[in-house]
């Protein structure tokens, strides 16, 4: 039986509570917005620059070649998705993102908070090397994926069952990422709040060219239930709001395109997928977030990610939960590059 993340979410819900914090006031930080080094070269050729690399000249032909590469010989007609060519500075599809996920307050929410910093970064670099070997065609961009708003088991002062991390914790993650030229994702579990309330509070970070966003439908409790009691949901309208918000930041601040990761492991977690709008300013990743044995993980990917294409795909690996039932093996990059399409965002928890 496949163990979806329904009540692995309980780990996320209550591991923060062990610290006895219900409401953390977000302290204002002076955040410098770095300028992105992006320069147009010609009509069909642009300089693509990310915080982790020197500018690399790419063109439309390379973009199309990379799309063909990641479709992995798929003949269904679903992939590649007909989406706008991203603006200069885009990470996808030119690189694969390999991310470590978690929260610094908890050793149980993911590898990012489980290990001491130096050990964690070294382990991430090891995973990057494995992916570069498995798919030499695609360079790897390391990333830290930090849960900045966590669903909670108690309502808190505002009754919204969520906890916002202090800005100083996000700053710590940014400093860690800088040590290995990684990008950063800040992840939002809205609980009984909503994206319209939570995302603007993170704007000064999202204005940074190396900071991207993740949103988690599992803990979006539109029916008012306690997080963890049922699996939550986002509609296309929620995803479009978020994408439009990020696109405006990109345009107003002359930023490279943002990556938006949407977690998913059930049908109901994302509704009306055909209404999700794509943009040259935002790269949407539909991320397979289930845990269990390899056959069930692949089936989930085929059922909910492959069959409802949006733009790019992701795949999550759980260091512990994927191995709960012996003798199941931990999936390798060599396993995942065989998928159609190849996932371009890989997350380890």
Image (cartoon, rainbow, N blue to C red):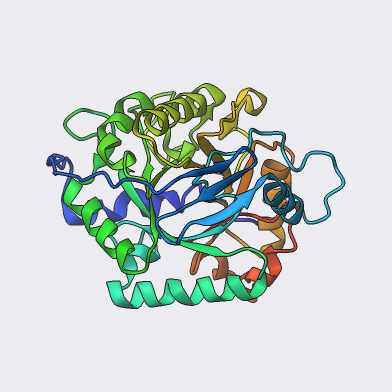
Tell me how many marks there are. 0
Give the side of residue 190 with respect to residue 303, left or right.
left
Relative image position of residue 98 (x, y in whole percent): 51, 61
* Residue at x-position 83% and y-position 54%: 73
Give the side of residue 32 with respect to residue 85, left or right.
left
Residue 128 visible to the viewer: yes
On-image quarter of the N terminus: bottom right
Relative image position of residue 212 (x, y in whole percent): 41, 45
Q: Quadrant of residue 50?
A: bottom left
Residue 151 visible to the viewer: no
Task: Give whichever of 313, 225 is nearer the camera.
Answer: 313
* Residue at x-position 67% and y-position 66%: 137
Relative image position of residue 195 (x, y in whole percent): 38, 28
Q: Outermost residue, front direction?
A: 42
On-image quarter of the C terminus: bottom left
Task: Give whichever of 330, 60 is nearer the camera.
Answer: 60
Relative image position of residue 5 (x, y in whole percent): 52, 50
Task: Give whichever of 46, 126 is nearer the camera.
Answer: 46
Task: Give whichever of 235, 158 is nearer the camera.
Answer: 235
């Amino acid at each position: 039986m496949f163990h979806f993340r329904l009540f692995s979410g309980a780990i996320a819900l209550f591991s923060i509570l062990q610290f006895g914090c219900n409401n953390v006031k977000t302290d204002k930080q002076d955040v410098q917005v770095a300028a992105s080094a992006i320069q147009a070269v010609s009509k069909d050729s642009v300089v693509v620059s990310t915080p982790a690399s020197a500018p690399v000249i790419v063109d439309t032909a390379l973009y199309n070649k990379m799309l063909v590469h990641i479709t992995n010989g798929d003949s269904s007609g679903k992939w590649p998705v007909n989406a706008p060519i991203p603006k200069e500075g885009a990470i996808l599809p030119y690189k694969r993102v390999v991310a470590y996920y978690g929260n610094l307050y908890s050793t149980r929410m993911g590898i990012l908070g489980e290990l001491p910093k130096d050990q964690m970064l070294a382990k991430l670099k090891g995973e990057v090397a494995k992916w570069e070997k498995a798919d030499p065609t695609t360079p790897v961009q390391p990333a830290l994926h930090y849960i900045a708003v966590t669903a909670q088991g108690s309502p808190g002062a505002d009754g919204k069952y969520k906890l916002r991390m202090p800005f100083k914790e996000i700053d710590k993650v940014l400093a860690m990422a800088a040590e290995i030229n990684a990008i950063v994702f800040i992840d939002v579990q809205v609980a009984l709040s909503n994206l319209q309330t939570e995302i603007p509070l993170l704007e000064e970070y999202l204005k940074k060219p190396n900071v991207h966003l993740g949103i988690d439908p599992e803990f979006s409790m539109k029916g008012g239930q306690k997080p963890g009691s049922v699996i939550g949901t986002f509609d296309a309208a929620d995803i479009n709001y978020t994408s439009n918000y990020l696109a405006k930041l990109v345009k107003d601040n002359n930023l490279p395109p943002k990556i938006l990761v949407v977690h998913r492991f059930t049908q109901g977690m994302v509704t009306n997928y055909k209404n999700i709008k794509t943009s040259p300013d935002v790269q949407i990743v539909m991320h397979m977030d289930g845990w269990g044995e390899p056959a069930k993980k692949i089936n989930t990917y085929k059922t909910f990610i492959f069959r409802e294409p949006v733009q790019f795909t992701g795949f999550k690996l759980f260091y512990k939960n994927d191995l709960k039932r012996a003798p199941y093996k931990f999936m390798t990059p060599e396993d995942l590059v065989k998928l159609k399409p190849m996932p371009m965002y890989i997350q380890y928890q």
